[in-house]
Image: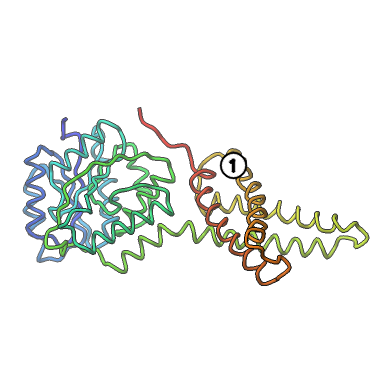
């Protein structure tokens, strides 16, 4: 493959001699275009950038102050789109010499072959992986799989290859620091972008001491992004339930008491549920999941889900009382069981809505 058709994006903050080793390795393996971003490094580290810039293959971008890894990546993507009109795409590499150039090349070749985003994924089961890194990645992968519905072997990998046609999308993603790389993955899920994985070497130099990742602050930024849909979903459900309760109360108050009892119950309940369910649908589509799928198709799927859920809720609640021979007239037990069933179905409904109701068609490449 002609590696001159792919640009290496290399963000760097306060580098040491490992940055020069990274650039030398990339050039040795045949890469011809490296976009190096100085993200507001200290004056005493500037000579590493000056040394790197002596290579004609290196184009150096400067941030006067530290803006974050995400900002550095987006700056490089913008520059690439404006200045490399004939290139196939980019591959992002970290400057701590933990990405072997052969693995970088393998990711680029996979991207060129498939036309898809490629993630270079490490093997965290190896014995030399620091315990903190092993636990952190496994936990994050589990959270990603559970709440986002994405199976990713290495959520924090900095070795990623992007075809040219997705870079405008990547530039529009929010986030300026480490959370930006998580936002990339979430955007891939939301927009149906298929990714590939390439297994790469698992390298830790001095247990990754040179990393600028701030364990608590940056972890919070990342998990907040992953869980935000569930928090918004909870708020949407509470708002919808409140609207339904208020409507039922108002309609019950204004309907003539001379109407038959079942009518006095049916009209407020049916009207309240109809309005609240439509409100819940549009809140979930626009604000919770940010779905771009067809409204008609999503609405049909939503009610295909909601109606059976009401039946299941009734059957489960009644089934618990029957199975355990519980007296349904006991207010406390009835309320507790009803609440437990609602919580279970609430969580189940969240995952079905996220993974089916509001999921756009996946964008496939030939």
User: In this picture, is 80 found above or below 135?
Assistant: above
x and y percent of residue 363 in the render? Answer: 41, 35
x and y percent of residue 282 in the render? Answer: 60, 50
Q: Quadrant of residue 244?
A: bottom right
How has the structure been colored for display? rainbow
- The residue at the point 93 percent across, 60 percent down is 258
Residue for badge 1: 301
Furthest-top residue in this view: 366
User: Position of 283 compared to 58: left or right?
Assistant: right
User: In this picture, is 95 found above or below 113?
Assistant: below
User: Position of 211 compared to 151: left or right?
Assistant: left
x and y percent of residue 217 in the render? Answer: 32, 68
x and y percent of residue 189 in the render? Answer: 41, 45
Local secondary structure at mark 1: helix
Question: How many numbered circles are shown?
Answer: 1
Quadrant where the N terminus sits is top left
Furthest-bottom residue in this view: 332
Number of other residues with Cα within 10 Å of mark 1, as a class: few under 14, some 14 to 19, many 20 or more: some
- Foreground residue, 55 or 329? 329
Quadrant where the C terminus sits is top left
- The residue at the point 58 percent across, 59 percent down is 236
User: Position of 12 compared to 294: left or right?
Assistant: left
User: Position of 172 compared to 332: left or right?
Assistant: left
- The residue at the point 38 percent across, 53 percent down is 144
């Amino acid at each position: 493959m002609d590696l001159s058709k792919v640009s290496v994006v290399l963000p760097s903050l306060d580098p040491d001699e490992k940055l020069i080793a990274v650039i030398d390795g990339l050039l040795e393996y045949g890469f011809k275009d490296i976009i190096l971003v100085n993200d507001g490094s200290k004056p005493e580290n500037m000579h590493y950038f000056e040394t790197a810039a002596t290579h004609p293959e290196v184009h150096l971008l400067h941030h006067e102050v530290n803006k974050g890894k995400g900002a550095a990546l987006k700056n490089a993507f913008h520059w690439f789109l404006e200045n490399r009109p004939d290139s196939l795409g980019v591959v992002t590499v970290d400057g701590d010499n933990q990405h072997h150039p052969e693995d970088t090349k393998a990711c680029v070749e996979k991207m060129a072959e498939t036309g898809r985003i490629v993630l270079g994924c490490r093997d965290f089961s190896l014995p030399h992986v620091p315990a903190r890194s092993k636990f952190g990645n496994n936990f994050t992968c589990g959270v990603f799989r559970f709440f986002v519905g994405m199976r990713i072997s290495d959520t924090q990998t900095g070795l990623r290859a992007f075809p040219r046609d997705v870079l405008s999308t990547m530039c529009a993603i929010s986030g300026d620091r480490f959370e930006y790389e998580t936002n990339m993955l979430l955007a891939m899920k939301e927009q149906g972008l298929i990714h590939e994985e390439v297994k790469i070497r698992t390298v830790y130099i001095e247990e990754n001491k040179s990393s600028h990742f701030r364990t608590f602050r940056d972890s919070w930024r990342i998990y907040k992004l992953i869980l935000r849909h569930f928090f918004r979903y909870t708020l949407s459900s509470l708002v919808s339930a409140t609207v339904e309760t208020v409507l039922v109360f108002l309609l019950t108050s204004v309907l003539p008491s001379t109407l038959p009892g079942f009518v006095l119950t049916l009209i407020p309940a049916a009207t309240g549920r109809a309005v609240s369910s439509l409100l819940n649908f549009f809140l979930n589509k626009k604000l919770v999941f940010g779905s771009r799928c067809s409204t008609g198709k999503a609405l049909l799927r939503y009610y295909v889900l909601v109606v059976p859920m009401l039946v299941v809720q009734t059957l489960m609640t009644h089934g618990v009382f029957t199975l355990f021979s519980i007296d349904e007239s006991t207010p406390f037990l009835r309320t507790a069981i009803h609440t437990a069933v609602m919580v279970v179905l609430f969580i189940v409904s969240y995952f079905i809505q996220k993974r089916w109701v509001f999921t756009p068609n996946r964008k496939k490449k030939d």
